[in-house]
Image (cartoon, rainbow, N blue to C red):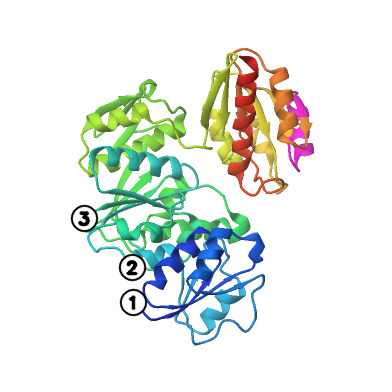
Amino acid sequence: MFENKKILILGLARSGYACCLKLVKLNCQIILNDVKKETELDKEQVAKLKELNIKCIYGSHPDDLLDSSFDYVIKNPGIRNDHKYVLKAKELNIPVINEVEFAYHMLPSDVKLIAITGTNGKTTTTTLIYKILAANYSNVHLAGNIGFPLCSILDDIKSGDILVMEISCQQLANLQHFNPDIAVLTNLSPAHIDFFGDYEIYKKVKTKLFKNQTDKQIAILNLENEDSINSTKNILSKKLYFSSKNKALAYYKDNNLYYNDEVIIKDFEMFIKGIHNIENALIAIIVSKLMNVPNEVIKKTLKEFKGVEHRLEFVDTVNNRKFYNDTEATNIKCTTIALSAFPNSNIILFLGGLERGQNFDELIPYMSKVRVIIGIGECRNRVKELGDKLGIETYIFEYLKDGFKKGIEVSHDNDIVLLSPASASWDQYKECEDRGKEFKKYVMEYKNGSN
């Protein structure tokens, strides 16, 4: 399908680089284009592409680059569909796909494919499913938006293997034939409106995960999420439901997690806390039972799983203060989830970052346990307005370093010190993970200084 083709790779990063390495083996004529200058890109990637004699155009998107001689455009998921090359490709009837769609066509036909998407919880759910299955089977692979391009592990995937993938909305936007055996939608709420322009479009993109499924394939859905239920009314898949409030195939009741009315585990036996993590665990239980994993394996993994880095990640306990890194909470919804996970605690909340016009008032119903707010980043003054409105002690700083010092100064025994910014990090950091790493560094410095 892709052998001996002329292909434009639009955007380097991890997915574009992985595509190049695979396409070279298919004897393709490859042109890679990235708007960043060569000096701004990964040096090792740039050097390897030179070694492979791949034509690379950096620093701009030349108007005359794309013409009818190309067979495909493989686009980085982060590039919008209104990019000039994407629009021109449509005019020229050139297919525009992404790394996931390309790699999907290279998979053995009998791979068991499990794909997870959703507004919140998809990374934790994907990781948890992978860990449970990997504890029971030796042929399980992890890929996708979780940080491992599918192209990069294609050579390791054999006939009959199990593949667990996190799929982002940006990846879904350019999928055409991708068809998982088990498709999971954790939940839906407004997000990425800046990318798609409209919540209705975002919902339609998310439900593309099910569009190629038949009634022989499985869709796992959140019974308590109205947008998920309404958006999937017309899919052909066999629908299985989980619920944190009502009876379903997998449900939560009286501190127990059930599957088909059988208790699998009690909530206090799990290390990860909060109703959102109970929902993540319920999804993992359904998938694991469908894959014939014994209860004892499921329970053992749920008891040992400590979460995903940067997502309500427990960092350490220092001087009777518990520190949590939730830097991936780049929107209001994620921060409400984090605050809901600590119903009986006093919280020192680090809030703020890139100014995107966030409506911090949406946090008000969840702020009753917040004792002190530390506002940081570009939007710190609006964070101060929120604190003043609520009568919560609030301090603002441009940088996390200064805010952390103040947070320690005003903290008490048994406080939760929580970085959950409800804001992107691009005002100061290349990635939000860098913000989380900095927070954890300060926790370790505080710990070492207290010894």
What residue sits 64% from the left and 74% below the top?
A: 61
Looking at the rendered structure, the kind of residue marked 2 is His
Looking at the rendered structure, the kind of residue marked 1 is Met
Real-space Cα separation, disc 3 to disc 2, in angstroms: 16 Å
Q: Residues within 10 Å of mark 1 (few under 14, many from 20)?
A: few
Real-space Cα separation, disc 1 to disc 2, in angstroms: 8 Å
Question: Could you tell me if the residues under marks 1 and 2 are in contact, i.e. CB atoms within 8 Å?
Answer: yes
What residue sits 25% from the left and 63% below the top?
A: 108
Quarter of the image for the C terminus: give it. top right
Quarter of the image for the N terminus: give it. bottom left
Q: Is residue 257 magenta?
A: no
Looking at the rendered structure, the kind of residue marked 3 is Gly
Residues in magenta, as a range = 376-395
Q: Find residue 160 and name its label.
A: 3
What residue sits 70% from the left and 28% below the top?
A: 404
What residue sits 27% from the left and 40% below the top?
A: 288
Label 3: which secondary element? loop
Q: Which residue carries the number 1 mark? A: 1
Residue 400 horizontal/vertical position (percent): 71, 34
Identify the mark nearer the N-term, 3 or 1.
Answer: 1
